[in-house]
Image (tube, rainbow, N blue to C red):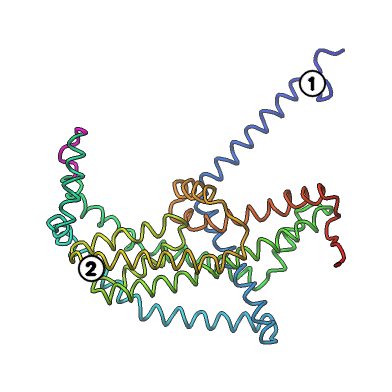
Amino acid sequence: MDGGNSMEGGPAWQVFLRFVAGAVLAAITVALIAYTIEVLCLIFAGIVFGVFLTRTRDSLATWLHLPRLLALLLMLALFAGAVTGLAVWLVPRVAHQFDLLLRELPAYLSALRTSQYGGETLQAVERALEGNGASGAVNRWWAEGTALFSQLAGVFSSGFSAVAAGIVVVAIGLHIAFEPALYRRGVLSLTPVRVQPRMIEVLDRCGGVISWWFLGQMLSMAVLGSAMSLGLWLIGIPFALLFGLFTALMTFIPNLGPIIAAVPIVLVSLTQGVEQTVYVLLLVVVLQNVEGLLLTPLVHRRLVALPPAVVLASLLMLGSIAGLMGAIITMPLVATVIAAVKVLVLEPREQAAAGTPRGFQEPPG
């Protein structure tokens, strides 16, 4: 036996070089993904929007008996008109309330500290911190509160990047909606012929999951945002429109979004009195139950089952890596992956175990 050969893999040095080349390629791929993760999340968000437009276009064309192109143009015209009208009415008011909140923030922080329950809560926290050798931590936290919200204002004021990201998402979505067959053929051309029927089913299943998720998010945003703004206005909490918009945006973040949205609302309500705080807590609980018991099951029954632990773990990982965009795409990404795994792995195994050919159904009776 030739000692320079490694069984059937050729000379040992060639095997070693192939191993090193594979490891280097894998490392470069991981580094490239890590470096461009935010861009990849942006592209995926555009794909989600494009799939939703395509599915909605098909449904509208079937319902109105229109050509698909005409249905798409009609849908885009209605969508652009609604968004423009909402922006003209909403943006100036939200901007005014946000500017007012920033200017009055020190007064609200001081009022929260001197309020009955706010002050008692802070004193309890401060005593606990002093017991752990962290005396004065609360004072320093309050001193840094204005700086924290100033940073938040900087995020909102640098709206150019957010607008640019939105333009990219819309552009990708429109390209997909106008020529979905082109991108579908592109995906299939990269798939071996023998598995193309399975890939077609994956694309159809994932498209349905994405479109229903997007529709559910739009419904949740509209209902929860409007209800929160109206409820806070009736209770007499300031910045009701701003908090309603914040609540609507936080619906995109699974599990943690409602908690994040409720925190500033409750803190501001503490400065208004005990009665208002109780009403706000009741409003938050009612709206969260409406979402959890009515809106979410109504739409998510069309989706694959999403394990909460998997969603939360994915949210934490994507949020830490890609920031807000990673948190936003967590739910559709997890749902898409699970749908693909179900079609490619789980269902074939179940059918093989049952001895039933794919696509075969038992006759009734």
Q: Residue 211: percent from the left, percent from the top?
A: 60, 67
Q: Residue at x 19, y 64 (%)?
A: 274
Residue where numbered disc 2 is placed:
276
Q: In the rendered view, tell whether residue 329 sits above or below residue 299.
A: above
Q: Which of 20 and 224 lies nearest the eye of the viewer? A: 224
Q: Residue 343: percent from the left, percent from the top?
A: 72, 54
> SS for tag 2?
helix
Q: Residue at x 55, y 53 (%)?
A: 40
Tell me which corner region of the image, top left, top right, bottom left or bottom right, holds residue 90: bottom left
**Three-letter code, disc 1:** Pro
**In the visual, does 142 lie left or right of 14?**
left
Other residues around mark 1 within 10 Å, as few (<14) / some (14–19) / many (≥20)? some
Q: Residue 283: percent from the left, percent from the top?
A: 33, 68
Q: Residue 262: percent from the left, percent from the top?
A: 33, 61
Whichever of callouts 1 and 2 sits on the residue coming sooner in the sequence is 1
Residue where numbered disc 1 is placed:
11
> SS for tag 1?
loop
